[in-house]
Amino acid sequence: MGRYTAAVCRLCRRSGEKLMLKGSRCLTAKCAIDRRNKPPGQQVNRRRRVSDRGLQLNEKQKARNTYGMMEKQFRVLFEKAEKQAGITGENLLVLLERRLDNVVYRLGFADSRNQARQLVQHGHIMLSGRKTNIPSCLVKEGDTISWREGSTKNEYYKQLQESIGSITVLSWLNLDRQNIIGKVTSLPTPDDVDAKFDGKTIVEYYSR
């Protein structure tokens, strides 16, 4: 599977806002948006007007980069959202939130979605008692997210035990802080997520 390997801070600078791609680092003075809040590359002095198509592309890229997906993956998920009943933009956001790597991040098991994806790929995470290494698999209501027994002995897990008490989880998730086990109590709704992109604009982008 392809993945983005260049500097992720360039993605935030290109979108013009923090996408929280480096976790807690994005909240410090080292954040690229705070230090150099302008697009990467050679700067043009004159102000350039962004077309409607450009605005739509920017929204799509923000969503794709926020969740760490390649274009083909994102398009497949969009087509799945399109086939579901309801509003396509809202369906897309719900599907993005249901990705296993995102849920691991939302539970506070990882500092960023990229780190959460690595935890899943390396086999540290159990989904409803089954080991899985597929970050893109979609969780469903009632699923539990826990740690593989062997992974509870590593240093990262021990550090997580000390910091898990300060984690705040979203309303559609439940976290057993003592055993570090998360549960999907309900499917997320668009209102549960503070999205940095407009789903309607993404639909307009793919509709052309």
Image (spheres, grey):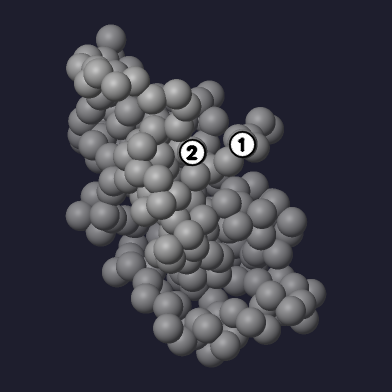
Residue drawn 44% across the image and 56% down it: 31
- Residue 120 visible (yes or no): no
- In this view, the residue farthest toward the front is 45
Which of these two is toward me, 31 or 54? 31
Residue holding disc 2? 10
Residue drawn 53% across the image and 24% down it: 72
Tell me the amino acid under the disc marked 2.
Arg
- In this view, the residue farthest toward the top is 208
* 172 versus 188 height, above or below: below
Residue drawn 48% across the image and 51% down it: 21
Q: Does residue 150 appear left or right of residue 37 in this picture?
A: right
Tell me the amino acid under the disc marked 1.
Ala
* 190 versus 3 height, above or below: below
Residue holding disc 1? 6
Q: Position of residue 53 (x, y in %)?
A: 26, 15
Which of these two is toward me, 34 or 160? 34
- Residue 10 visible (yes or no): yes
Q: Does residue 132 appear left or right of residue 84 in this picture?
A: right
Residue drawn 25% across the image and 59% down it: 192
Q: Element type at marker 2? A: helix
Say the numbered circle drawn on residue 180: none
In space, the residues marked 1 and 2 are separated at their CA atoms by 8 Å
Q: How crowded is mark 2: few (under 14 residues within 10 Å), some or many (20 or more)?
A: some
Query: Which image quarter: residue 29?
Result: bottom left
Q: How many labels does the image show?
A: 2
Which of these two is toward me, 73 or 50? 50
* 168 versus 8 height, above or below: below
The C terminus lies in quadrant? top left
Q: Element type at marker 1? A: loop
Q: Where is residue 90 in the image (x, y as percent from the top left)?
A: 25, 40
The N terminus lies in quadrant? top right
